Amino acid sequence: MIPFLLQRAVWGVIVIMSVVTVVFFLIFVAGDPAVTILGPQARAEQIADFKARKGLDQPVALQFLSYLGVAPCIRKDSPKYLQEDGTPGFCGVLQGDLGESYSHRESVADVIGHRLPRTLLLAAMAILFELLIGLSAGIVAALRRNRWTDTTIMFATFAGISLPTYVTGPIALLIFSFLLGWFPFGGYGVDPLDHVYHALLPSLILAVAGAATYARVMRGELIETLRHDHVRTAKAKGMPMRRVVVRHAVRNALLPVVTLIGLSLPFLVGGAIITEKIFAWPGLGLLTIEAINSLDAPVIMAVVLMFGVAVQAGNLLADIAVAALDPRIRLG
Amino acid sequence: LVGWIAVNFPEAPIGPRYIGAGNETPRSGGTFVFSAGSNIHTLDPHFAYDTLSTAACRLLYDGLLDYDYDGEMIPSLAAALPEISKDGRVFRFELRDGIKFHNGREITAHDVSWSMHRLLSERVGSPGYPFFKSIVGAPAYHTGQADEVAGIVVVDQKTIEFRLDEADQTFLNALAMPFAYPIAREHVEPLEKEEGIDAVGRHPVGAGPFAFVRWERGVQVELERFDQYWAPAARPDRMVFLENISGDVASARFRNGDLDILYRPNKVNRLFFRDSKAWAPYRAEVPSASVFALGLNTELPPFDNVHVRRAVAFALDRRKLEKLNPGEVIAAGQVLPPMLAPYDPDLPSLQRFDLERAKEEMRLAGLPNGWSEPVTVWVRGEGDVRLAELFQQELKAIGIEIELKLVTFATYLRETGRPRVAQAAFTGWHQDFPDPSNFMDILFHSRSIHPQNSENRSFYRNSELDAILDRARAETDREERLALYAKANEILAREAPWAFLFYPVDMFVWQPYVKGFRPHPVWLNEYRHVWLDLPRQRVSQEIYDQEASP
């Protein structure tokens, strides 16, 4: 197990580093962050001043090394630019410093600190709905195979997978918020209970595609498992059908679903970008869109870094979880 | 079941859901809720350079000077407009009595001076610095060569003087920008020390009509009425400024009665409100202080020839734009927007559609058969592409083929600011402050040409224009000054470094119970004078039925 984890970690770091490098240089290909942040009204002098403060007037390679934290700090407005003894300090990722957002006057860590929990709340509720709806629909469909319930569920999942959130989202808002008034019309609310209430509709929409996928996978697996010998044996012993399904069949059928959950984590956060936009949910997704539009390089980099780590961690967790559930799999 | 749902399904409201209580006299109370589509970046006025931060700072802070609803400059924290010395270089302000920060302390001339020093210091790094460089000793202080700014003189507790290196009337406009709003030293200094300069933008203490309550970042800013504000008036008890509410959501919330005012609804909703009789009394459409144009690079052929530029300016049929975007744009033929003197609707050199004159100009340019190669026009997005396609035919009529180069906004900004790169580009400007210099000096003075990031993106050089603009900047006589700018305005329309296209029109819709709102010619979201006619009453949508069938 340990060698496996180490190997995965090394690969993870290599992948993350490559992504970070590519994105860093892409930002500079896309345009000049100082010019973009300050906008079309900016004076040449303001741009020059901004560049000097942020070290954007330095060679890009040096900026990158300084961002990583292997070269000295080039951001003059960073408290770490000069140490107490007058020697240059370091202010890069290796020192745990993600820099300061160009447009929000706040450190990147703080900006993300505000936004991430909101997106996690959305994602967590979405996973909950995905499993709740997806698994129960899958089980029902499998047990009522080829009857009208099954057909209806399968048709619904087909629609669920096909319809993108930017179609379902606005329609749901129109019907359930605007016309019926059951849910708040987008936004985040002000206290914790309010947040959950505001998250209901967006997380349901976010969960549609996942729930549909889980339902189909669950149905397929369960039908397969129900044919297995151990299930037939359990039935033959006179075990009630409910127990047969729950204890013997569903547990086995869950394996591929668990893998899927692990793999879907980063995509859930990614899918949240569109959903957050539609529902005016002020999370990481909205932040990312804005950061990309305004070339807020430190925020873009931090988000890329986070997503990189999340994908790697998600995959790893999925592997470990599968190994734990399936005694036949040994990692290492 | 389907039938039951169809019959009982609620319909979208067609008119306001709530009306006012009918109070004749302004009254205080209630919560005023408004929203914007993105984030507020800071509540520190020394960094408020985007529209949302400015809108929030307008409620929290107050400055020496302000503008009234005619766009005229008026005193605010100052007791009167300043005394100006004969040479136009010294401005002396008396402060009003009884002006207080939200912490209850009276504001003195020292506060104004200290805040200006903070703004000008390199340590703080405000983007507002270039606007105040003309104060004597400001550059020396900025670079750390002096401990204070020689040109900021506290005469006594209530009197402060600003001395400039050269006469510059736009200095007063700069002073009216949020950059110059005073902030409370005893609050700011410990905050900067403990949490850094940025923290000031999260814990604002100003002298404006509303005091800070809290800011849930990315969600909303909450303010409460400041009872010791120097200009007592009926105001809402609370102001809630919602962030990140996209256009569709904002419009729907507004129609539900959850938002009190709607600014710049998106296209679909704009059409709805335009056509709605029920909303008509609560709607305003005003030209925004911006101009959009096709910028022509005067250093690159064929636009180095003034006749070709003029031909383009005469070839574009701007009325088509008005027809295609009813109510959203007004055709433009000069750089100044309609609300800014000396705008002149009868300008002799006004750019307008006249195909014969366009062809004549092409003949004068020696190109009666047009330009041989296609001209590259840089565009920033799909909106610009549609705009360009609209004009493709018309330019073809004078023998100019255009080729569109669609780039990201980031690339567009970088490349169009460099000399000899973009032949032509869709461009525009929104005023920083209401003075003609803010359009003309920045966009067309040869001083605004740089090897990178030129503000003068048509790279237009005209020593006659430069001289007029320099004189106008320094001129203290208002009439004389406007006459100079009128001349410059005429030159720019005639010389056509830009083919002016349109002024965008802003739309506001507010709830019937919102009183005292008027679009402000300078401040985009100006809600300082709003009061709420409460308690609001819910009304049945049936009262609007007569208009439902067109």
Image (cartoon, coloured by chain):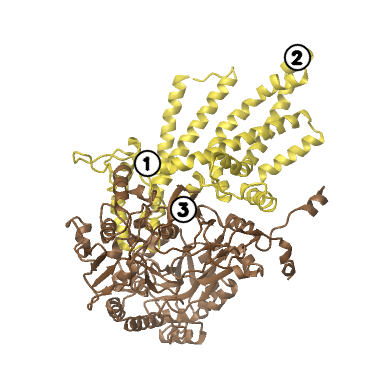
Chain colours: A yellow, B brown
Which corner quadrant of the image does residue A241 belong to?
top right
Measure the C-alpha gap from mark 1 to mark 3. Answer: 31 Å
Instruction: From the viewer's side, name the closer residue of A44 and A116.
Output: A116
- Residue A120, labelled with which disc? none
> In the rendered view, does B332 fall on the left or right side of A326?
left
**Percent position (x, y) of residue A133?**
68, 35
Q: At numbered mark 3, what does the secondary structure look like: helix, strand or loop?
A: strand
- The relative height of residue B347 versus residue A58 in the rendered view (above or below) is below
Which corner quadrant of the image does residue A197 belong to?
top right
**Percent position (x, y) of residue B57?**
41, 58
Q: Quickly name the residue at label 2.
A: A233
Q: Quadrant of the C terminus of chain B?
A: bottom right
Q: At numbered mark 1, what does the secondary structure look like: helix, strand or loop?
A: loop
The residue shown at (48%, 75%) is: B501
Q: Spot the residue most to the left.
A: B145
Q: How many marks?
A: 3
Measure the C-alpha gap from mark 2 to mark 1. Answer: 58 Å
Q: Chain of mark 2?
A: A
Judge the density around disc 2: few (<14), some (14-19), many (≥20) Cα neighbours within 10 Å: few
Q: Chain of mark 1?
A: A
> In the rendered view, does A215 fall on the left or right side of B185?
right
